[in-house]
Image (spheres, helix red, strand yellow):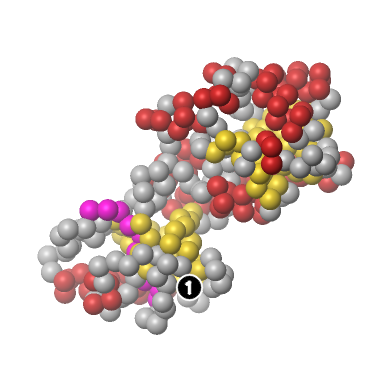
Amino acid sequence: MEIWRSLDDVPADLGRTSVVIGNFDGVHLGHRQVLARARAIADAQGLTLVAVTFDPHPMAVLRPEHAPTTLTTMEARAELLGEAGADAVLAVPFDDDVAAWSPEEFVQRVLVDALGAAAVVVGANFRFGSRASGDVATLREAGERHGFTAEGIPLDGGPMVWSSTYVRTCLAAGDVAGAAEALGRPYAVRGAVVRGDQRGRELGYPTANVPTDGMTAAPSDGVYAGWLRRLDTGERFPAAISVGTNPTFDGVRARRVESYVLDRTDLELYGVEVEVSFVERLRGMVAFDSVDALIVQMDDDVRRARELLVP
């Protein structure tokens, strides 16, 4: 999977393309519908399928106080886009200059000059250009002038249309099953394992600690059953996962994702990049009156996680 970080990175000999455009944060089932249609067109016409996205999220530039937390890093997003059918990803660096492009300027610079688009597929609610002044009709009219087809795909959903906002709402409620339904896979976070306070090891449950930050979405505080995957080797392990600040002990303020790999105390993961995916919520976060009470609860958490994950 190639990731082009600017228009200048796009190969001059790319040839004609089928293009999808969007933020694609999370690459949920709605996004995959758009990609499936563009993939079918690409296969029928012998085109390269390019996914155009933006880095950072446009709201982080236009209205940073309202910028959403991200569901995927750009690298994870590109990986997911590739799994959904894209041949390459163009991550347009979004800044004030790009925000000021008119719809026609966006079409000319990105779709015509850089990508040689023959077909463009977007979601039916797609908006683009300065002040979001362009829509699917604008794109279709531009295509008639520049020699590409354009279509907007209605986005299906469950209780509401699949969207990145819906996934974030599920995560904020701890509904990782709902998030997984919209994504078509368990929600996951990635990061390097850091050295923690070693309390889990002292209690018999050593954990791999991945810090969270305010710009990355994580499920609400609680305990979950899920999986830890090493990104260097691909090994995957069942895990009981705690998200939060560890309220039983004083002094811990930063939220973090702590994964206890079931029945393993021999893993050395410090500095290793891992992916932690969430399958089911076990309980909310509780401050216990004693360490003994905490251990009893941890024993039960691990038992329930094992029942859910291990055949």
Quarter-wise, where is residue 139 in the image? top right
Depth check: give the residue in front, 95 or 297: 95
x, y percent for residue 197: 25, 68
Position of residue 159 measured from the top left corner of the image (x, y, whole percent): 50, 40
Is 17 contained in the magenta span?
Answer: no
Measured as percent of width and height from the top left, residue 229 is found at 50, 67
Q: Residue furthest front?
A: 8
Q: Residue at x 32, y 67 (%)?
A: 195
User: Residue lying farthest right?
Assistant: 45
Q: Is 208 displayed left or right of 58 in the figure?
A: left
Main SS of the magenta part reads: strand
Instruction: Classify 79 as above or below 20.
Output: below
In the image, the segment drawn in magenta is 253-262
Q: Residues within 10 Å of mark 1 (few under 14, many from 20)?
A: some
Amino acid at pointer 1:
Phe
Q: Nearer the viewer, residue 117 or 307?
A: 117
Taking the view exactly as shown, the residue that stands out farthest to the left is 289
Residue 181 seen: no
